[in-house]
Image (spheres, rainbow, N blue to C red):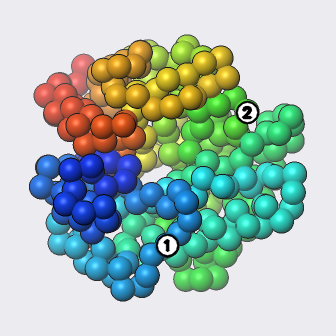
Amino acid sequence: MDRLRFGTGGSPFSSQKRSTLSGIERIAELGLECLEVEFVHGVKMSAEEAARIRERSAALDVKLSAHGPYYINLASLEKQKIGASRAMLLQTAKACQAMGADRFTFHPAFYQQRSSEEVYPIVKEQLQLLRTSLLENGITAVQIRPELTGKPTQFGNLEELIRLAHEVEGVALCVDFAHAQARSGGQVNGYDDFAGMLTQIKSELGKATLEDMHIHMSGINFTAKGERNHLVLEEAEIDWRALMQALKDFKVKGLVICESPNLEEDALKMQEYYEGIGGRG
């Protein structure tokens, strides 16, 4: 990735129409540079629509990604749900290839009263099978990016995601810093914590990983059980300015997807602040 680009999870609210195509055009008008297409309730996109999206996003230099359906559980206790989850992710990957997106993210699994050591090999195997399916379908340039999740009951802490990226070809990270705060009960917050996460990623996966990050960011409301809902940045406890400083200092490149309830307002706020600060060294 050539730089750090900011954008929204879903079409901006100020888009002329509630469509991905209109969202791409509004992203460009606002001076933002990326858009995450939300397939959270299922993958519904015709080949014709995908072709128009691909052409328009390329013309406007708006980088695309996608979020897979919410119903994913690659470690479900019900085996048919595991197969259905993998099928939905394959559909997401096919849509990505058709519309020119090079990555998709998703919430990978739930522990369901099991330990990380029990769930990890199940998720790993399913991602390996998914990767095989992608290759069998000629999908070679779409990255699988499981997301850092917001509740302690969900599989997907930073250590688990780093291990998956290290052990499964084609898998990379989606780092949601607000989720990191929520699943830690608020302990992960501030420059030192964010810099520590980036240091860990760089140490275990290499500098190149920081040069193509996929980041989610918003304010967040949480309890001892983790994430409850997203908040506008200024209404939340998260030190988003410290995160921008850490991203600048570590020379992070890639996509920052804003998921705040006011979408483009906070995306522009982060972009403006990021562009106005200098690195510390």
Residue pointed to by mark 1 = 44
Q: Is the residue 259 above or below the residue 128 in the image?
A: above
- Left or right: residue 249 versus residue 161 is left
Relative to the observer, which residue lies in front, 164 or 268? 268
Quadrant holding the C terminus: top left
Residue 244 percent coordinates (x, y)? 30, 28
Residue 29 percent coordinates (x, y)? 12, 55
Q: Quadrant of residue 80?
A: bottom right
Crowd band around label 1 with a 10 angstrom C-alpha radius: few (<14), some (14–19), many (20+): few
Q: Amino acid at mark 1?
A: Lys
Q: Amino acid at mark 2?
A: Thr
- Find numbered disc 1 in the image and state the secondary structure of the residue it sits on: loop
Relative to the observer, which residue lies in front, 68 or 251? 68
Residue pointed to by mark 2 = 153
Q: Is the residue 71 above or below the residue 160 in the image?
A: below
Residue 238 seen in the figure: yes
Residue at position x 66%, y 55% in the image? 71
Q: Is the residue 154 above or below the residue 49 in the image?
A: above
Residue 256 seen in the figure: no
Residue farthest along the bottom direction in this orientation: 48
Residue at position x 27%, y 34% in the image? 266
Residue farthest along the front direction in this orientation: 17
Question: Marks 2 and 1: which is nearer the front?
Answer: 1
Residue at position x 72%, y 53% in the image? 73
Image marks 2 and 1: residues in contact by CB distance under 8 Å: no
Q: Is the residue 228 above or below the residue 13 in the image?
A: above
Residue 144 percent coordinates (x, y)? 56, 59
Relative to the observer, which residue lies in front, 128 or 46? 46
